Image (cartoon, grey):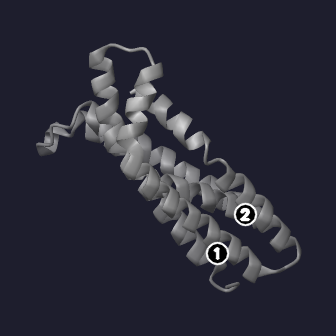
Amino acid sequence: IAIGSMLFDLLYWNFAFLRVSTGGLTAQAYGKADFAEAMKVFVRAVGIAAVSSLALIAIHRLFVGAAFLVVDSSEQVRDLASVYFNIRIWAAPATLSLMAFKGWFIGMQDSLSAMITDIVVNGVNIAGSIVLAMGLPSIGYEGMGFRGIAAGTVLAQYSGLLAALLLCAIRYRRQF
């Protein structure tokens, strides 16, 4: 899991511009009270996130193969990290979109929505990963083992995306 997570850190670090540039451009539009431009920035950022995430999903096996050319690990660790990565990659659309949402929220001077989104992601990640990995024997669910941790992260990212969409719809419906 640690190696699989490290691979995602390496991968997603390259997309930090989605949060930073979206925040800066949105803040400029917000400062001019140009909410139409702020929305255009948001739409472009989410569009870039969507296209980029589809590209990442398309090349993820090549990325893992290339990463293990430089990451020293046993074959067993490599196999487990690859399984983890192959599950968690399906969160890429939500993860990259959340970067755009958080940048946009911050640019709109709404750090509360960004924080709520992060709390949802982290809370669901903790609970979801534990339940999906360990199961709930009382209801007959035995869990998925370490695969459940990756699945819990996927669930958490999409839960955060849903929270961001709801916050956006509630807080900004009148401005756009």
Q: Horizontal placement of 36 versus 122: left or right?
A: right
Residue 60 located left or right of residue 111: left
Q: Residue at x 23, y 31 (%)?
A: 145
Label 1 Cα neighbours within 10 Å, binned few <14 / some 14-19 / many ≥20: few
Amino acid under label 2? Asp
Task: Answer with the quarter of the image where residue 47 lies.
Answer: bottom right
Residue at 60%, 72% (x, y): give it: 168
Q: Residues within 10 Å of mark 2 (few under 14, many from 20)?
A: some
Q: Amino acid at mark 1?
A: Arg
Is 34 above or below relative to 51? below
| Circle 1 SS class | helix
One can see residue 94 in this view: yes
**Could you say which is closer to the camera, residue 122 or residue 44?**
44
Find disc 2 in the rendering and name its residue.
110
Q: Residue at x 64, y 57 (%)?
A: 102
The quadrant of the rendering that contains the C terminus is bottom right
Residue furthest to the left in view is 140
Residue 95: x and y, percent? 50, 52
Query: What whole-number distance in Å separates the C-alpha atoms at marks 2 and 1?
Result: 10 Å
Can you tell which quarter of the image residue 110 is in? bottom right
The location of residue 32, given as percent across then percent down, is: 88, 76
Of pointers 2 and 1, the one earlier in the residue sequence: 2
Q: Are marks 2 and 1 in contact (CB under 8 Å)?
A: yes
The percent coordinates of residue 130 (x first, y second) are 33, 36
On screen, residue 55 above or below 137: below
* Residue at the spot of label 1: 171
